[in-house]
Image (tube, rainbow, N blue to C red):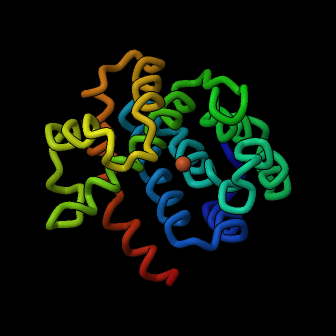
Amino acid sequence: MKTTLTREQGLEALKKYNKEPFHILHGLTVEGTMRWFAKDQGFEDEADFWAMAGLLHDIDFEMYPEQHCLKAPELLRETGAEEELIHAVCSHGYGLCCDVKPEHPMEKILFAADELTGLVGAAAKMRPSKSVMDMEVSSLKKKFKDKRFAAGCSRDVIKEGAEMLGWTLEELMEKTILAMRSCEESVNKEMESCQ
Ligand SMILES: [Fe+2]
């Protein structure tokens, strides 16, 4: 899996359709998370593709929330994205807003980690450190079980994602925390510079 899009082009496209800092932050976080997973899963040579899918996965969400994953192909084609990238982006909405099934390991990870990074991010905000650096799986599990906490993060989607991958929920949580640790500093720096 390869993309001809440069990171600059990807970021430009994200910012063209997303003005909310929260949405930029989410794109950057999932980008860094996917880059970590590519290496972890032995797909280091595809890391740019995995990261690009993470960066652009919600490209249509801010402006077209009712057509999430349906409007994305048009916006991505206009950006110059290849069909493989479009498939990857759309598949993260499988069963939620479209019927593009995650097939590749990358797509399954995007499906699972997208929702979980939201929960981890919300849990990190509650910590004195405001960081994932000192977050443990045990405390994340408690937040996962507390249905009122970050209620918008679907526990069912996270569970389904882990199942698709054949991973336990614990494994998915552990890896996602590590992935988010790997990029927290660079994401924060980039957010500072774009405000
Ligand atoms: Fe997302």
The residue under the point 50% across, 84% down is: 195
Question: Residue 188's x, y, as percent?
Answer: 37, 71
Marks counted in the figure total 0
- Is residue 59 found left or right of 137 in the rendered image? right
In percent of the image, x 30 and y 26: which residue is there?
A: 169
- Name the image quarter holding residue 39: top left
Q: Is residue 102 left or right of residue 161?
A: right
Residue 38 in sight from this viewpoint:
no
Please, which residue is most extreme toward the front here? 148
Q: Nearer the viewer, residue 115 or 80?
A: 115
Q: Of residues 129 and 144, which is closer to you in this image? A: 144
Q: Residue 148: x percent and y percent?
A: 32, 45
Rendering coords of residue 5 (x, y %): 70, 55
Q: Residue at x 59, y 44 (%)?
A: 49
Residue 27 in sight here:
yes
Judge from the rendering whether residue 25 lies leftward or rightward of residue 144; answer left or right.
right
> Residue visible at 66% across and 41% down?
89
The image position of residue 187, as x and y in percent, is: 40, 66
The quadrant the N terminus occupies is top right
Compared to residue 106, the image places residue 160 above or below, namely: above
The one of 126 and 15 positioned closer to us in this rendering: 126
Left/right placement of residue 67 relative to residue 161 reads: right
Above or below 128: residue 4: above
